[in-house]
Structure formats: C-alpha cells, structure tokens
Image (cartoon, rainbow, N blue to C red):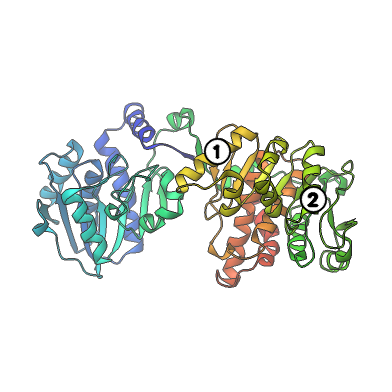
Amino acid sequence: MKIFKTSQVKDIDAFTIQHEPVASIDLMERAAGTVTDWIVEHCHKSINVKVFAGPGNNGGDACAVARLLAEKGFGSVNLYLLNVSDRISPNAEINRERLFRQNRVKVYEIKAENDFPQLSLADLVIDGLFGSGLSRPLEGLALRLVKHINKAACEVVAIDIPSGLFGEDNSVNNREGIIHAAYTLTFQFPKLSFFFAENNDFTGKWQVMPIGLHDEIIEKTPADFQFVTDMEIREIIQPRRKFSHKGTYGHALLIAGSHGMMGAAVLASRACMRGGAGLVTVHIPHTELNIIQTTVPEALSSLDKSGSCFTETPVFDKFNAIAVGPGTGTSQETGEAMKKLLETYPHPMVIDADAINLIGMNKEWLDLVPKGSILTPHPKEFERIAGPTKNSYNRIRVQMELSAKLGVFIVLKGAHTSIAFPDGRCFFNSTGNPGMATGGSGDVLTGLILALLAQGYSPEDASLAGVYLHGLAADLAVEKHGENSLIASDIINYIGKAFLKVKNF
C-alpha cells in the first residue's frame, strides 16, 4: 500500500472526482459513511456524541458524520462549528445545510472561548476541525479549542487525521496544538506521520478506511513510502518443490555468539532453521560447542580458534549467505575479524547487533560493506553508524540517504520497522506488537532474514518478508502468551504458523 504526501492525495481525489466520475460532495458522503459505520460498530447509541467541525472539507466530513449518526439512531448528537473567519468550504456549507434540514442534530457556532462546550469523560468527541492539508501550527481560538478538548480527556475519534497534526514532518509544529485521539480513521492511505513514535499520543490506534479512490491514479502516482501488507508478502513467498532437497534451500553461515552471549547464537540459528534454510552452520568460539549442539541439534558448527569470541572467518565457498553480529561482542580481535570479513566477502550479507556497533566504532568500514547487504539496527545502533537525529522524520530521511549512498538495505527496527531500499523507497511493516520489546527478538529477525537470503530470495524480498513474518509470528504468539510474557523463543515457535497464514491469505 502506497503512502502518499498530503498534496498527492488531493490530486488523487481530484482525479477520482473527474474520472469515476463522482461529485466531490458524494465522495465526501462516501468517506463520512465509513467513519459512521465504524462508530456504529464500536459505540453504543446512547452515548453523548459531540462533533467538532472546522471550516474546511474535514469539517464537511464531520457535519456529514453527525447527520448520519442521527439517522442511525444515536439519540444525543451535537455539532460545534468553529467559526474563525465566517468562511466555510462549499462542501462543508452543503453538509451544514443538510444538518439544518434534517433537524435532528443541535448545531452551535464557536466564535469565542465562551462558546466552548463543557465536556465530560462520558462524551464521545468526533474531531473534524482540520484535515491533512494543514501547513502551519494552530493558533488563536483554534489552538485554545484543541487544548480545551485535550484537557477534558474524552475519548476522541479523529476523522482522517488528528487536528493540528501535519501529514509528514512535524518538526516545527506546536505539540500543544494537536488533538490527542484515541482512534484515527484515515481515508484510503495512512499518513507518513502516523509511523513515528512521537506522534502516537496524537493518533492513538489508527485504521485505514477505503473510500474507493481511483485505482488508475493510485497505480501511476509515485510514492517513496509504502506500507507492507499481507498481499505483497504472499507474492514473495515461494512454495517448496516436490523433488527438492536440503541443498535446494541453501547453506547459511551465521557468525554469532561469544562467551556469556551464546543465547544470541542459539536464537538466531533456531530462527534460521525455522525460516527454511536447508543447512545452517554456526561459527562460534570453540569452547561453546556443547551449547549449540544441545540447543540446536539441526545446526552444523564451525569452531573459532578463540574460546571466547569471533576472531577468524571460515572459508566462504560452501555458503549461500552469511549473517554476522548477534552476541559477538566488540573486542579488538573481533573487530579485526569483522574488518577482514568485510574486505573479503563480496556478496550481500546480513549485518546485525555488535557487527553494526563495530562499524559505528570504525565508520570508514561503511565503504567496505558489500552492495546489497542488509543492516538491521535498532535506533541506538543506527545512531552509531549514522549519527544523532532530531526526530523520527529526520531519522527516516537519514536512513534513506545512507541506504542510497551505500547501496544497502537498512532495516531500522521499531513498532513499524522501516526498510530503506537503495533505490530511494522506504517500506513500513504492518505486523508486530509491543511484546516484541524483549531480549533476543532482534536475533530472531537476523536468523529469519538469513534463512531467506540463503534460499535465494533477493535482498529486497528477504528483508521485506523477513520483517513481516517476524512480526506476524509475534502476533500469533501473543494470542497465547500475551504481550507482557512474550519472549524471543515464542516468536521462533510461531514462525511456521506465520508461513502457513501467509500461504492461506
């Protein structure tokens, strides 16, 4: 699913109106209908509904929602129209007149602070003050009204976008002038700003509401950002062939673990096996052999001359893909081995955890990373290789720039893990849950991506599918274990069910 800039969505709306064809007021009615249906499904009709409408098209949506809720039998619906200039958009004016003709909704104008209604925790607030076209922070009466609504701490449902929030970059926004919504019902496409942690308090839980915008213009309009959904992953995952054998599905080399950090090697290698690699060899300190043999009996072992850490690289000839970093530590000897690996292995590899930290300690090594490699940092590890960033929007831009500069794929882990492609595109993942905030979760992801890369998936497909399946396995596991009790091993145990679910979409 593409994620468009707010300016592009306006053009897509216009194309739909012209080529469907559909009148703009009828497209607004369609959008308002999806919001109304959601409220009917989730809220009791006896609730007090207070709808706040602005002077633009978002306000027109709000007026239509108020009317439709009254038609659906909601007994207490009041609408408050913010009037800051006596100007109102044509579609908002039409929907206001429809409200008057219906005569079931009480309509009030807000021209001064004295017009603000009293709000209680029992009220449901529908926010339709300002839409995604907003380009400057709220001020004056509008700002004070937003603060008034937020102070009441009512449950707020935002139409399309929380009022005051910009669709992309909020670096210069006034955070006090943004509605705190419990739910955001956004039309057709998510907004880029929804994917940033600092905006979560504004958007709450957000849901995309299809409103039938024209497929032709959606298809041909370019977008730097995309939201990964089940259909894209179903197209990536290939079925196994009847006469295949373990050699068909690749031999993966995992360089992982050090004394006291062998859990990372165990988790990553188990995930690699569950991810479908035909063979997995784990390169470990020679004193740690028993750990791997007893915990991952399916894996082969390559023993380092050191008994405590990674200090040498095995011969690469028999391996189809390599991953390095989980639990390796950052000792001088390991750094020397890491540099040699970067200098001598010419193919894409998966680089994670301490391998990224070593590169961060020796930034000149970035130029040694093989083209097409997949780096999987968490935000702090990313800062070690890319430097500090001011906010999530700035960080995603730095991530994309670094990916393009180095010719690598950067998987920046988070609630919506972002995957930057060297060609300038960036994908946000749609699976996963807060239970994944647990030690070893990243090691599982490394093993899973390595498995796909070893099987011959391209770095593009391995990174997208690996991240999606990792999150989906966690979503399936959390149904049994809950978010508080989820551990990395649970994610591994549900990788197989994640593959099955993708197959059966």
At a point 52% along the width and 48% down the height, the residue shown is 388
Q: Nearer the viewer, mark 1 or mark 2?
A: 1
47 to the left or right of 376 = left
On screen, 265 above or below 401?
below
Looking at this rendering, what residue extends furthest in the front direction? 332
40 to the left or right of 352 = left
Task: Provide residue 106's location: percent of width, then percent of height.
Answer: 12, 57
Q: Amino acid at mark 2?
A: Ala
The image's mark for residue 400 is 1
Task: Provide residue 333's location: percent of width, then percent of height.
Answer: 81, 53
Assess whether mark 2 and mark 1 are in contact (beta carbons under 8 angstroms): no
**Residue closer to the observer: 182 or 112:** 112
At a point 58% along the width and 37% down the height, the residue shown is 402
- Which residue is identified by label 2? 277
At a point 80% along the width and 43% down the height, the residue shown is 341
The image's mark for residue 472 is none
Mark 1 falls on what kind of element? helix
Few, some or many C-alpha atoms within 10 Å of disc 2 (few <14, some 14-19, many ≥20)?
many
The earlier-in-sequence mark between 1 and 2 is 2
Give how far apart the Cα atoms at labels 1 and 2 are.
29 Å
Asked if residue 505 can be seen in this view, the reply is: no
**Residue closer to the observer: 371 or 79:** 371
Q: Amino acid at mark 1?
A: Met
Task: Provide residue 7's location: percent of width, then percent of height.
Answer: 36, 33
Mark 2 falls on what kind of element? loop
